[in-house]
Each structure stands twice: as C-alpha cells, then as structure tokens.
Amino acid sequence: MGRSDHARRYGVALAALLTTGALLLPAHAASRPVTVVELFTSQGCSSVPPANRNVMNLEKRPDLLPLSFSVTYWDQLGWKDTFGAEAFTTRQRDYEPSLGRDGPFTPQVVVNGRHDTVGNKAEALRAMVAGAKPPAEVAIDITGNVVKIGTGIAPSSGADVWVVRYRPGVQSVDIARGENAGTTLPVPNVVTDIKHVGRWLGVGMSFSAPASEAGVKTAVIIQKPGGPILSAATD
C-alpha cells in the first residue's frame, strides 16, 4: 500500500494503514527499548498520593517509561477524575486474569505487563523495577509520525499494537471534593489517549499516526493480549 492510499482518519481507520512485509530495521534505526511501568490511579482514591510520588521518582530514568492511567470506577466517591477514561479502566481490567487478580484496584502498578504490586509500597515497587529489563523482542522505530516495527517471533494469535499518547513530566491537580479533598495531587506522565491500531504477526509493518499536539509524546507498545509486553519504545 502506498502512502497516497493511506486513510487520513485516526481510530478505526488507522488499522487500514498497517502494512506488512519483510521489514527488518537496522540496529541504528531502532528507538531505545524501555521498561513500561503502568500506574493505574484515581484522583478520588485516598490511597493513591503515595503511589503517585513513588512512580514520580522513576520518571527521570531513561530506561523506564512510567505511564499514569486514570481509571473511572472511583468517580462516584465525590470527585470525577479529570484525566479519567473508560479505555484506561478497560486496560486495567484486561490485565487482571493474567496477574491472578480478582478485579482491579488502585493504586496498582504493572511492570512490563508481567508483574504487579500495590503502588504505595515503595520497597516492593523498587524491587520489581530493579529486577525488570526493557523488553526488546521486537525492534520499534518512531520517527515523527511514522512508526516501523521489525520482524520477530510473534505469539500464535499475534500481538496487539498500541499507540499511547502522554504528557511527560508531572501534572498537578487541585482536588475539591471526595477522599482527597483539599489536596493538590501530582500525577506523573499522564496518559491522554490509547489506541489499538492492529496486530503484529511477526513480519515487518509500518503505519503513520497523525502528529500529536504540542507537549504530548508518543509511545508504541507491542504485547500479548492482556499480558506480557514484547517491546516498547517512545519518541
């Protein structure tokens, strides 16, 4: 498929942009692989502030990609999370079976889609991150709005390809109601959007994503459905 044939609309149409072939990325082209640390958080949960601070302490390490997903199931406690989205709640729920959990909770931290801990347990979080290595089973290159994924061994059913948009650094939110009323909550690397854009089947593929708005970065995650991350990179 040529570039002129690419659909211009994002979302469902983006899946049509995926192209397959014997795409093998040279070593110098691959973006640096990162360990993905996903914090499932909520501005309405009183247990969250220590976890947010613990993940903030990881934010400056270049080998780590902390991402804060604000869930929605605590919105009924009196404060609607200003960063919350149902897609983030769904992502957390999809993890629970493979992690051996009965259901989602906050603050939960998932590392590389393989292990989890309670985010306000600083020592447990540090130990889990220290023992993790950046998954790099698949080469990913992000150059501008063009993403290229190399060849490799895919799961039998293929792997999910996700595009994540996030704001680097810390966003501070003044909480007026609910369990955290009267406090200012810092949230690191706030995820603003996540899109499933197709399946990686072991052969090279590429796609174009629209330019992100100012101040927003892009990450690409390849993972077994609801399970381990095979590779991840950020621009």
Image (tube, rainbow, N blue to C red):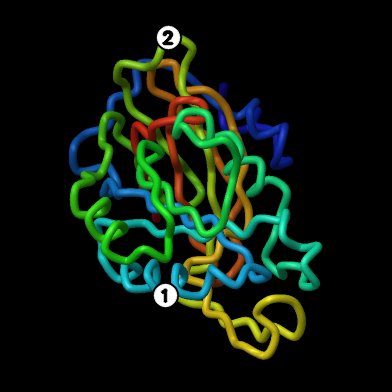
Circle 1: element type: helix
Q: Residue at x 40, y 59 (%)?
A: 66
Report the residue marked by disc 1.
Answer: 53
Q: Residue at x 36, y 47 (%)?
A: 111
Query: Mark 2, residues whose alpha carbon is within 10 Å: few (<14), some, or many (≥20)?
Result: few
Circle 2: element type: loop
Quadrant in which the C terminus appears: bottom left
Report the residue marked by disc 2.
Answer: 156
Residue 56 on image: x %, y %:
39, 72
Q: Front-most of 221 and 115?
A: 115
Amino acid type at circle 2 is Ser
Quadrant in which the N terminus appears: top right
Name of the residue lying farthest toward the top:
156
Residue 172 on image: x %, y %:
57, 82
Answer with left or right where residue 52 lies relative to residue 35. Answer: right
Residue 117 on image: x %, y %:
39, 51
Q: Which mark is residue 118?
A: none
Query: Mark 1, residues whose alpha carbon is within 10 Å: few (<14), some, or many (≥20)?
Result: some
Q: Residue at x 25, y 60 (%)?
A: 126
Q: Residue at x 38, y 22 (%)?
A: 204
Q: Front-most of 195 and 69?
A: 69
Sequence-wise, the earlier of marks 1 and 2 is 1
Residue 171, image quadrant: bottom right
Determine whether 112 is above or below 126 in the image.
above
User: Marks 1/2: CA distance?
Assistant: 39 Å
Q: Say if mark 1 contacts mark 2, CB within 8 Å.
A: no
Amino acid type at circle 1 is Arg
Residue 74 on image: x %, y %:
72, 60
Image depth: mark 1 or mark 2 in front = 1
